[in-house]
Image (cartoon, helix red, strand yellow):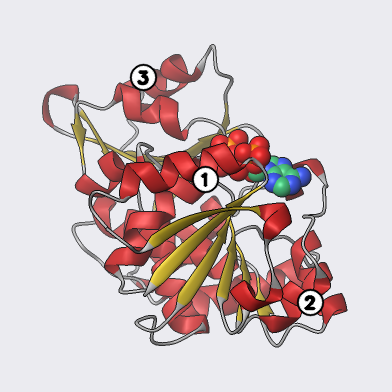
Amino acid sequence: MTLFTVIGNPVAHSLSPQIHHLFAQQFGRELRYTRSLSSPAKFARTVSEFFRYGGTGANVTVPFKQAALALCSQLSARAEAAAAVNTLQLREHGQLFGDNTDGIGLVADLHRQYGDLSAARVVLLGAGGAARGVIAPLLQAGVSSIVIANRTLASAQQLVAQFTPSYPRQLTALALSDMTPQQCQQALIINATSAAWSGQNLAIAAECLAATALVYDMNYGAQPTPLLQQAAAAGAQRSVDGLGMLVEQAALSFALWHDGLTPNTDSVLQQLRASLKR
Ligand code: ATR
């Protein structure tokens, strides 16, 4: 039986084992998918031991996506662009291949939740690793512009400088505190900050949230995320969490590990929603 794992910290509540078992069932396949708690000091050893003991592939989550990149001898173009790896695959001669399916997972879920992205004006909240990983996939999916709004303006400016040579005139940096309802008017607002991890609310005016076409939070949970609660209180037209992104990025990892098999993600997303509500 093939063996997979998700490596993270924390990792106890990861839904990845459930998702990958549901995918495997669709194809009548059996697999084992475990959770591996690691630490920055132990991460390289966690990875090497997992593959030494028969692992085929691993997902990597917070806070090890940059560390995972450093362990790979081969990288996909999208992992290189994101400077982070969320999917590891053991290849010939013990070589590790690293991919990043987060950004295209987000795009796939946005097609489900928002539809055609070609006219979308995106306001991206955050300028850390999670934000950097989705910029190129969003632009490649055809969004018309991205405003990177971050608490610390300098980090947003750095990201704009990094991506502008490849995508001229499409990116702007903004301090989160300077965001206006006009900038949010009919925009697709995407939360890529880690504020929720520390239980913090984002300092965004209710008028901004109310003006958007869709509030998309890359976070998810059994309860509505803090931003979704803010959006509901502000009277936002539509808001959705990142559970669909999680399922889509997992499907792309699954395809990489299983010779291109593409699972049905709609049914798995419905099953996960139902099980989270229980
Ligand atoms: P990740 O890899 O998850 O993106 P990160 O690289 O540490 O984590 O980045 C965290 C992002 O969340 C940053 O953009 C951070 O803003 P700053 O650059 O100003 O630190 C943002 N963030 C975290 N807590 C926040 C809060 N309470 N309000 C607004 N932004 C927050």
Indicate left or right for 28 with 148 as reference: left
Graded by Cα atoms within 10 Å as few (under 14), some (14 to 19) or many (20 or more), the crowding at tag 2 reads some
Spatial CA span between label 1 and label 2: 22 Å
Say which residue appears at 83% left-offset and 47% top-offset.
199
User: Label 1 CB, ligand 1: below 8 Å?
Assistant: yes
Q: Which residue is mark 2?
A: 207
- Disc assigned to residue 156: 1
Q: Amino acid at mark 3?
A: Ser
Q: Quadrant of residue 141?
A: bottom left
Q: Amino acid at mark 2?
A: Glu
Which of the two marks, 2 or 3, is nearer to us in this view?
A: 2
The image quadrant where one finds the N terminus is top left
Task: Kindly check if marks 1 and 2 are in contact, taking CB atoms under 8 A apart as contact.
Answer: no
Decide which of tag 1 and tag 2 comes sooner along the chain. 1
Q: Which residue is mark 3?
A: 48
- Disc assigned to residue 184: none
Residue at the farthest right position:
233
**In this view, 180 is above or below 97:** below
Q: Amino acid at mark 1?
A: Ala
Say which residue appears at 24% left-offset and 48% top-offset.
165
Q: Circle 3 — which element?
A: helix
Spatial CA span between label 2 and label 3: 49 Å
Which of the two marks, 3 or 1, is nearer to us in this view?
A: 1
**Residue in front for this viewpoint, 129 or 24:** 129
